[in-house]
Image (cartoon, rainbow, N blue to C red):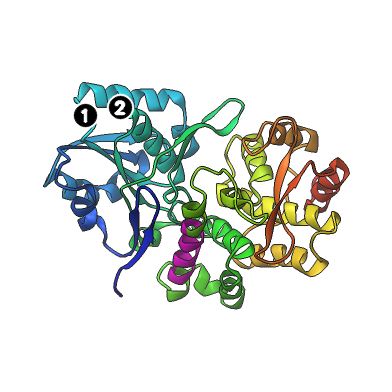
């Protein structure tokens, strides 16, 4: 099957390529003006990253930097180590960074590129389904602090994104399901066809070689492209639409769950729980009906994701949500639905509704 090219417009346009065996595209995306390339990769993926490394060393001076796996990479100390390595290697503004790994690698690698000399070229090669449909597209970069997730970061759009579906063949089923958490989210906020595909053939949706999964990937990426082109820096949308904030559907509780579990839970798993939760908040607030709320649990469960959780006291989660980057002042803001693919902002939700929704999720009020 031919590669699919999804174009991201705006002030710094680039392409997202979806296909198989895409490492050969790296020189064309990086360009001829680049002399040095830093390949930042998740350390457990060094064998998978070798193909990209082989392509790069044939064209550039390459600095290969192994990063810790997962959220452990998203720290100021890891970013500092990368900066020191770039400095020792003499990286200039005309040089580039390539990231190879999951969403955490993309986040910290993108932040290193955004902050080195106030911004150098970066190309992302996401290795997980989650990173393909979420972290690699849209130019958000970030690291974590003790107070929460992604509280330090920058907007820095990539020069290109290569979504090599062959990398998904190496993933355990749990990682595919976790990635589908973000995909199904996109179905609720913007593209209901995603829900139809996932619910009608959940087996194919979880098969890395299927045409169904490829379509789900492409549709989810297109949802994100449409949102970020209209509102790159999260300043707001038109006619009541949340703009880029819509991509945070389910994320307020999800980030709190991630922190409560010391990031042991996968991001997409937490997002599924967060979406089920916020749908229940919206139902109790009279914004959506019972059927749409119930469909959240059905759709996420269909692709192998848990829809109940009780791993922390609600007060602990609420304290984390209060300092979430989507809050404004002391007021909590949730992305909610007023109907399928009709997202809005609910500012200052009722604490009773928040507690009752958590109880419905399986936790203690």
Give yes or no for residue 217 being in the magenta stretch: yes
Query: Label 2: how many residues lie within 10 Å, few (<14), some (14-19) or many (20+)?
Result: few
x 67%, y 58%: residue: 343
Q: Which mark is residue 92?
A: 1
Which quarter of the rendering shows the N terminus? bottom left
Marks 2 & 1, CB-CB < 8 Å contact? yes
> From the viewer's perspective, is 108 left or right of 17?
right
Q: In the rendered view, tell whether residue 231 sits above or below residue 141.
A: below
Q: CA distance from mark 2 to mark 1?
A: 7 Å
Helix, strand or loop at mark 1:
loop
- Location of mark 2 (residue): 117
Residue 319 place in picture, x, y as percent: 74, 31
Query: Label 1: how many residues lie within 10 Å, few (<14), some (14-19) or many (20+)?
Result: some
Tell me which segment is drawn in magenta.
Answer: 214-225
Residue 246 place in picture, x, y as percent: 61, 52
Q: Earlier in the sequence, mark 2 or mark 1?
A: 1
Give yes or no for residue 69 being in the magenta stretch: no
């Amino acid at each position: 099957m031919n590669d699919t090219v999804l174009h991201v417009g705006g002030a710094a346009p680039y392409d997202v390529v979806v296909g198989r065996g895409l490492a050969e595209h790296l020189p064309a995306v990086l360009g001829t003006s680049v002399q040095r390339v830093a390949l930042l990769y998740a350390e457990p993926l060094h064998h998978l990253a070798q193909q990209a490394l082989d392509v790069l060393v044939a064209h550039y001076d390459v600095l290969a930097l192994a990063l810790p796996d997962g959220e452990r990479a998203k720290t100021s100390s890891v970013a500092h180590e990368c900066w020191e390595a770039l400095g020792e290697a003499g990286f200039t503004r005309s040089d580039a960074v390539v990231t190879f790994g999951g969403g955490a690698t993309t986040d910290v690698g993108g932040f290193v590129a955004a902050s080195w000399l106030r911004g150098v070229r970066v190309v992302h090669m996401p290795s997980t389904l989650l990173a393909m449909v979420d972290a690699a597209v849209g130019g958000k970069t970030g690291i974590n602090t003790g107070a929460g997730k992604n509280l330090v970061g920058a907007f820095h759009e990539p020069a290109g994104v290569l979504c090599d579906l062959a990398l998904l063949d190496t993933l355990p089923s749990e990682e595919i399901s976790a990635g589908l958490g973000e995909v199904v989210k996109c179905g609720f906020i913007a593209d209901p066809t995603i829900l139809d595909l996932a619910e009608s053939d959940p087996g194919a949706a979880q098969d890395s070689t299927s045409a169904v999964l490829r379509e789900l990937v492409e549709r989810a990426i297109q949802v994100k492209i449409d949102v970020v082109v209209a509102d790159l820096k999260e300043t707001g949308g038109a006619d009541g639409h949340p703009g880029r904030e819509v991509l945070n559907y389910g994320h307020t509780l999800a980030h709190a769950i991630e922190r409560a579990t010391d990031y042991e839970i996968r991001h997409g798993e937490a997002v599924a729980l967060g979406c089920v939760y916020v749908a229940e908040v919206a139902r109790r607030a009279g914004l959506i009906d019972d059927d749409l709320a119930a469909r959240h649990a059905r759709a996420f469960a269909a692709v192998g994701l848990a829809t109940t959780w009780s791993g922390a006291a609600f007060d602990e989660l609420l304290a984390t949500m209060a300092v979430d980057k989507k809050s404004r002042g002391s007021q909590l803001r949730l992305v909610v639905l007023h109907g399928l693919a009709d997202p809005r902002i609910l500012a200052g939700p009722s604490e009773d509704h928040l507690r009752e929704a958590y109880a419905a999720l399986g936790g203690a009020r």
